[in-house]
Amino acid sequence: MPAQPVADLAAPAGPAGAVANAAAAAPANVDPQEIAKFDAIAQRWWDPEGEFAPLHRLNPVRLGFLSQHARLAGAQVLDVGCGGGLLSEAMAKAGARVRGVDLSTAAIEVAELHALADGLGIEYRVVPVESLVATEAARYDVVTCMELIEHVPDPATLLAALAALVRPGGLVFVSTLNRTARSFALAIVAAEYLLGLVPRGTHEYARFIKPSELARGARAVGLELVDVAGIEPVLPGRDFRLGQDVRVNYVAAFRRPAAGTP
């Protein structure tokens, strides 16, 4: 059954409701088939020409967007769905104190070994992010969730956990794919079947999320939209840049209002 759009999923409003929602539904918000897909290719996370090549080229763009809105040096950062650690390492090299979490044991093992080889003190854990809410609510200055929300059965519960874990005044960053004809043509038909840029079956169109749906879902858990930008291909070539076109890939920044803010 296709996952419901985030706008259609009920979630208690505000940070307190976010804590309750995330904690109550923590164990179920995982798709074993999604984990199996990424476990199978985990050893190739750091191959810039392998299955994760698009993420290698996206990484500087994602980091650039983060740096526009957040001061990473000295920040306590949680990277949710960190995979093999591409963004975690980039943020650590920018001076952040990074913890990465993922449900792929194979990916976390790769991330740990790569960080050790690079001398980076990143803490990685195999744990559902929702389970952290009970002990780490409002702990982090920055929470990132890149290319994950379209892979979980319940996007609203994931958003609730992100909102609960960031401190008041802190920032949450989410990137995903828009649900448009253009994204279907480029991210699935072209990238998976015609060009072979990513493995077939990586994405399910029904799970793509429109920016308006993401913004409504974020508001429902007490987050305010700060900015949204499209991630556009640079042609000719295979690189990406930030732009105005959100029809395919996009990244959004949200803020949890500071304590006392109406």
Image: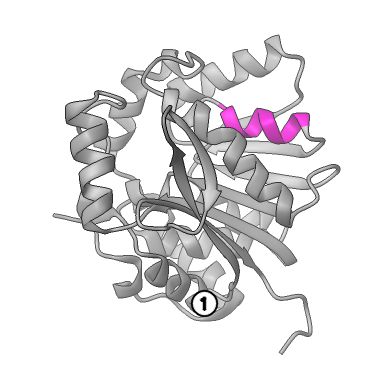
Residue at screen point 48% across, 78% down = 220
16 horizontally vs 39: left or right: right
Q: Where residue 196 sits in the image (x, y, percent)?
A: 25, 23
Q: Where residue 155 sits in the image (x, y, percent)?
A: 38, 59
Q: Which scheme is used to colour this image of the protein?
A: one colour
Is label 1 in a helix, a strand or a loop? Answer: helix
195 horizontally vs 46: left or right: left
Q: Where residue 148 sits in the image (x, y, percent)?
A: 42, 45
Q: Where residue 203 sits in the image (x, y, percent)?
A: 26, 41
Figure disc tally: 1
Q: Tag 1: residue type?
A: Arg
Q: Residues within 10 Å of mark 1 (few under 14, many from 20)?
A: some
* Magenta segment boundaries in residue numbering: 85-93
Principal secondary structure, stretch drawn in magenta: helix
Seen as rendered, the residue at the extreme front is 236
Seen from the viewer's position, the closer of residues 105 and 152 is: 152
Quadrant (top left/top right/bottom left/bottom right) for the C terminus: bottom right
Task: Look at the image and say whether residue 225 sits in the magenta stretch.
Answer: no
Q: Is residue 126 visible?
A: no
147 horizontally vs 205: left or right: right
Task: Look at the image and say whether residue 86 sits in the magenta stretch.
Answer: yes
Above or below, comparing residue 93 to residue 233 in the picture: above
Seen from the viewer's position, the closer of residues 231 and 167 is: 231
Above or below, comparing residue 95 to residue 42 in the picture: below
- The answer to which image quadrant residue 39 occupies is top left
Instruction: Report which residue position mark 1 lands on.
Output: 219
Seen as rendered, the residue at the extreme right is 74
Residue at screen point 61% across, 19% down = 112
Quadrant (top left/top right/bottom left/bottom right) for the N terminus: bottom left
Q: Is residue 107 visible?
A: yes
Residue at screen point 61% across, 13% down = 113
